[in-house]
Image (cartoon, helix red, strand yellow):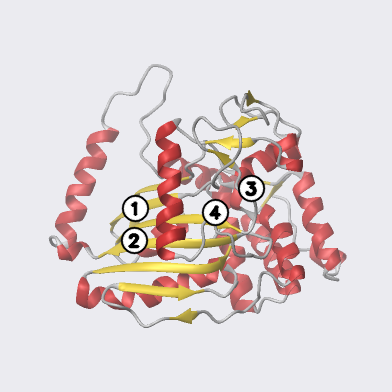
Amino acid sequence: MNYTHEALTAFASQVLTGFGCDLEEASIVSRHLVLANLNGHDSHGIGMLPMYGAQVRDGNLICNQTPVLHEPVGAISVVDAQCGFGHRMALLALDHAMHTIGEHKVAVLGLRNSGHVSRVGTYSEYCAARGYVSLHMVNVVGHPPIVAPFGARAPGFSTNPISMAMPVNGEAKPLLDIATSTVAFGKIRVASNKGEKVPLGYLVDHEGVPTADPDPMANNREGALSAFGEYKGSGLGMFVELLAGALAGKDTVATKEHIPEGVYNNMFSVIIDPEGFDSSDEVAKRTLEFYDYIKAKPAAKGVDEVLMPGEPEKISRAAREKNGVPVDDETVRQIFETADAFGINEAQLRTSLVEA
């Protein structure tokens, strides 16, 4: 079923207020999730609400939390999110870190102990809107790892995403937003919910053999996701774990101390003022020059056009703003089931869910 993005935002906000989020936090989180859906990243969209609800119910995700903003050391800032909703915590942390840019032309952030930050590209866009280049890396703790290191049959780290962007007239252009696994776990969940197979190369089974069946992984965590590019993506995933977890945070997937069950993120970010190198206009000019240079390359046989990082998301957003956002019935059912556990009125909630 396709729904308007306005309806999905109102629907998600109502669920989040039912969890206990105030209106500001519910607005930030719901807009973040629906923007992920609009951009084609359904794995990080409103389908995350059941997981958030379970963590709130267990006391491992705290609504309306106040982060600890440590005093910067030079250009380095550390923020402890104290298990708050990552979508809001990350924005507060970035705002805090950016205070050092005036003096140092750079800010380095370690966000620790955060609830799920969801689509990491959002933070590259946030920085680009302020005229800054940025790089963000995120690791995941609180549940067993789900990505197999190259050559292994058992998982050794999580999807460990990386995002980076150049600012051009307040826009992230280009914008790279990737998992270091071949695919995000949420896409396996979505495929399972839809009863679909996945392409070979996304998953390995319990023996490390490629499989197209998403159900064992989605339902029972049997097998593992594959790292992209074999040893190359595997190596990048390991360094994301180290930079976000060992350096910026206080835990990696190998940390022995008890971490509550759930999804917790550490994020390592570097935010750069291009004025430290040259005028922002000149940097943007060179960026666009290269952007257009690549776009002008002849497309390969069977390909309509050469797309830059971030363009598939723009195409998806335009189409979904016009035609509505597809959300499968199983995902909707799971959200209603979660809402019911919080005593949220189903009839009232359904009035928000307007079809496109």
The answer to whether residue 201 shows anywhere in this view is: yes
Q: Position of residue 194 (x, y in %)?
A: 74, 37
Q: Amino acid at mark 2?
A: Ala
Task: Name the disc covering residue 254, or none.
Answer: 4
Horizontal arrangement in the rendering, residue 19 relative to residue 225 (left or right)? right
The answer to whether residue 177 shows anywhere in this view is: no
Residue nearer the viewer, 36 or 256? 256
Residue 339 picture quarter: bottom right
Q: Amino acid at mark 1?
A: Ala
Identify the residue position indicated by label 3 in the image.
324
Q: Callout 1: helix, strand or loop?
A: strand
State the residue at coordinates (75%, 68%). Answer: 58
Circles 1 and 2: CB distance less than 8 Å?
yes
Q: Is residue 6 above or below residue 296?
A: below
Identify the residue position indicated by label 1 in the image.
165
State the residue at coordinates (29%, 34%). Answer: 295
Q: CA distance from mark 3 to mark 1?
A: 27 Å
Q: Nearer the N terminus, badge 2 or badge 3?
A: 2
Q: Nearer the N terminus, badge 1 or badge 2?
A: 2
Crowding at dot 2, Cα within 10 Å, few <14 / some 14-19 / many 20+, comes out as many
